[in-house]
Structures are given as structure tokens and as C-alpha cells.
Image (spheres, grey):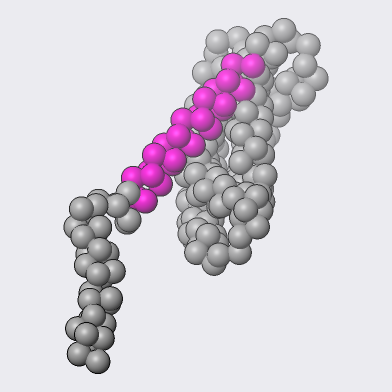
Amino acid sequence: MRAARTAAPGLFRVPIGNILNQRQSNPEKSVPERVRNREDAAWSAILLFGLLFFAGYLGGVFKGRSGQSELGEQLAGYYRSAEHFSAFVPLFLDLFGAALLQAVLVLACGVSAVGSGFLCLYFAARGAVLGLCAASVFVQGGTKGLVVHWMLTCLPDLGVFLVMLWLAVQANRCAGGLLRMVLSNSTHLRQMLPVKRLLLRFATVLALSAVLSLVGAASGVLFAGVLL
């Protein structure tokens, strides 16, 4: 009995001591390490999406320079029309509607296990459309037309690109978590937590898009009255 009493505390003391020793020997593991991994993944996604956007933009420029794209001609005619920039409210609704559709698309990618691939397609396609539009405007209006086009659209286009990139980083993280759940047949609730952050970013992006659309519509009407 006495031997059992002396041995019993040791049985519980050894595992606790091992755990404490492991924590002391690896103080940087756990939360700081997960934060660093999350930041590295975020920067990797930013770099990838940015490269795809600019690659698509260059592809659109080369396509639009030929002057044989019907879509490019339609886009150029739309953005070179003074009537399109004549009224503030319709222009604001157009800008905000386009930003809203893009935000919903990025959000949908975040709740799909294959959303990362669609995010890559989105940024490449978005860059291609902007590049095609700019090149087509240059073909129809020359250097002056291109400068006017940039002054009218640069601010909202750049702003929307940045906020969608910010939203896409979180969407990519959620999509990656869902893909890992599907592949590993896991239903751990902690892997679903990023969805809350995604919804919060989505709401923030809508507010930022509204502000960008207001500024873009106001500057568009102002510049169009002078330049077009």
C-alpha cells in the first residue's frame, strides 16, 4: 500500500512535467507560428493574384491593339461616350453595381472547396478586360483618348482592385480550409472560423466600394464635363 501511494503521484507527475518541458523548449510554437504561417500564405496569395491580374492585363492589351475585338470596340465606345458620364446617380449605380457583383463572386469563391482556382480566373479575366478596354480606347482615340480614359476610370478601377484583392485573400484561406476538409473528411469546427472573417470583410468591402463609387462618379462627371 505504501509503495502504491508513493508510485501513484509519480505516474501523474511525469506527463505533466513532460508537457511543461515541451512548452518551455518550444516557446514560439502555437499561436505566433500560426500567425506567421497565415501572413506568409496571405502574401503568397497577394503575389499570385497580382501577377495573374497583370498577366491578364498585358494579354488584353495585345488583343486590343489589333483593333479586331468586337468586345473591345463596344467597351471603348461605352467609356468614350460623354452621355455615360453626364449624370451622377446613374454613373454611381453602374460603378457600385459592378463592384457589388465582383464582391459577391469573390465571396462565393470563399465558400467553395475549389474557390482558389476560380479566384485565379477572376483576377486574370479582370485584368484582361481592363487591358482590352484601354488598348481599344487607344486604337480609337489615340494618346489623348487613353489619357482621358485613365483619368475617368483609374481611381475606381484601382480602388476596386485593391479591395477585391483584400477580400480574395480571406476567401482563398476559407476555400483552402474547405478543400482540406473535403480531402481529409474532417468536420472540425475550428476550420470554419475564417468564414466569419470573410463575411466581415465582405461587409467592409461593400462599404468601401460605395465610397469608391461615390468618389469615382463625382470625379467622372467632373472630368467628363471638361475633357469629353
Where residue 202 appears, as percent x and y from the top left, is 54, 56
Please give left or right for residue 152 compared with residue 82 in the image. Answer: left
Magenta segment includes 44? yes
The part of the chain drawn in magenta is: 34-59
Side of 181 relative to 9 (left or right): right
Up-down relation of residue 49 to residue 141 (above or below): below
Rendered-image quadrant of the C terminus = top right
Q: Is residue 214 above or below residue 125?
A: below
Q: Which residue is drawn at 61% across and 41% down?
A: 116
Query: How many labels sit on residues?
Result: 0
Residue placed at 52% from the left, 48% from the top?
A: 173
Of residues 107 and 140, which is closer to you in this image? Answer: 107
Q: Residue at x 54, y 23 (%)?
A: 54
Indicate the position of residue 48 as horizontal and vertical percent values.
51, 30
Image location of residue 108, percent across then percent down:
66, 52
Res 73 → quadrant: top right
Residue at the extreme bottom of the image, as rendered:
1
Question: Would residue 115 be counted in the magenta stretch?
Answer: no
